[in-house]
Image: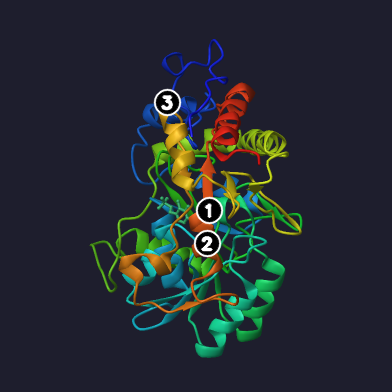
Amino acid sequence: MPLKNFWQAPGLRREMRQRIYLSSPHMSGLEMDYVDEAFKTNWVAPLGPHVTAFENEMCIFTGRKYAAALSSGTAAIHLGLKALGVGKGDIVFCPSFTFAGSANPIDYLGAIPVFIDSDPDTFNMSPSALEAAYKEYPNPKAVIIVNLYGNPADFGALLCITKRYGTPVLEDAAESLGAEYQGKQTGSFGDISILSFNGNKIITTSGGGMALTDSQKWRDKIVFWATQSREKAAWYQHEEIGYNYRLSNILAGIGRGQLKVLEARVKRKTEIFELYAREFADNPHIRMCPQTAGGKSNRWLTVITLSGECKAGVMDVIGALEKENIEARPVWKPMHLQPVFKNCPFFSALSATGVCASLFERGVCLPSDTKMSDGEVRLVAAIVNSVVGTC
Ligand SMILES: *Cc1c(COP(=O)(O)O)cnc(C)c1O
């Protein structure tokens, strides 16, 4: 299908435009003050005043009691699961529709992931698929619940089930910082919750993560393991295997500068989502990603799904955008379809292949960068509408 060039208005021509990204780092300008301070005071180390302050500020923001700043979200999941007692041969429930960073740490601990399908109304873990998994595996050691693309999971239904079975929950809020469910910040729903500050996330430290909890015992254990499990002794005494997972004081400084603009970032991400929604309102082949009832997404990425009757496929849309130097991606490929996890059990309430497999066939992540102008959002929407067609 030939593309019309109507969107190439002056000033928007490809060769005159910077690449438009899915979600790229967006500095506030305040970060350098914190980084300077770290240099001036010589706190160039994986500990220091910014680390402690960043942890405290994040506790206040999410309403948690304790935080441990770590080198990545994946490290936080690893040590979070370990704190919940996950070890060799244990079963851990995990949504199939997520980034591999949610699932890999299950394997680091020698545990077995059991993948759970998505609910079509939230894209997140389906409560009925979770029930189905419990029928076969009544004693999982932990359940990982992910807030995908910034949309909170259906915690009302999900936590009711996990409580009934007495399973601890690790909330993966890597993508959802600033999102709310029933008026409470995400990051406050797990026995242990985790955040990521990777470069693509809503706020970034270039790379980093955090574990959040109300248990001082778990927080202390996580920090202990993250610093090579060094015992309290004058010499280096080790009675357990440890890791080098702490966040640097310089990166924590970047995080403090970023946290100051988190609310502004959520606001802009939401405006971008709403602008796309208006531009696609008359296109019967495009459905906007859902928002969980009772939830307020941070709209980290705007995701659309194409209808079955649509002439164009996901890769047609992505290819047309790439031609205009615009980044778009398929949604996460489900974990139960990944070769590395092909032998792991998968539970769905609706179909053998899963709701998430059909979302993977029809879902596109659109550029949701907070540095985009409204004109750029409209440009992306015009290209998508033109590829997808409106009839
Ligand atoms: C980014 C991400 C992670 C991992 O975080 P890193 O900081 O990149 O290790 C885990 N889970 C989800 C859902 C993510 O999007």
Check if mark 1's residue and mark 3's residue have beta carbons within 8 Å: no
Towards the viewer: 153 or 194: 153
Q: Earlier in the sequence, mark 3 or mark 2?
A: 3
Compute the Cα span from label 1 to label 3. Answer: 46 Å
Local crowd at mark 3 within 10 Å, few (<14), some, or many (≥20)?
A: few
The residue tagged 1 is 362
Q: Measuring from the top left, give residue 83's x and y in whole percent.
A: 45, 71
**Which quarter of the figure has residue 319?**
top left
Quadrant in the picture for the C terminus? top right
Towards the viewer: 33 or 372: 372
Q: Residue at x 62, y 58 (%)?
A: 64
> Considering the numbered disc 3 on the image, is that residue within a helix, a strand or a loop?
helix
The residue tagged 2 is 358
Nearer mark to the viewer, of 1 and 3: 1
Nearer mark to the viewer, of 3 and 2: 2
Q: Measuring from the top left, give residue 99's x and y in whole percent.
A: 44, 57
Compute the Cα span from label 2 to label 1. Answer: 6 Å
Check if mark 3's residue and mark 2's residue have beta carbons within 8 Å: no
What amino acid type is highlighted by mark number 1? Arg
What amino acid type is highlighted by mark number 2? Ser
Q: Residue at x 49, y 51 (%)?
A: 331
Q: Measuring from the top left, give residue 104's x and y in whole percent.
A: 36, 64
> Considering the numbered disc 1 on the image, is that residue within a helix, a strand or a loop?
helix
Q: Is residue 197 visible?
A: no
Q: Is residue 276 above or below residue 10?
A: below
What amino acid type is highlighted by mark number 3? Asp
Local crowd at mark 2 within 10 Å, few (<14), some, or many (≥20)?
A: some
Q: Is residue 189 visible?
A: yes
Q: Measuring from the top left, give residue 330's x and y in whole percent.
A: 46, 48
Q: Earlier in the sequence, mark 1 or mark 3?
A: 3
The residue tagged 3 is 36
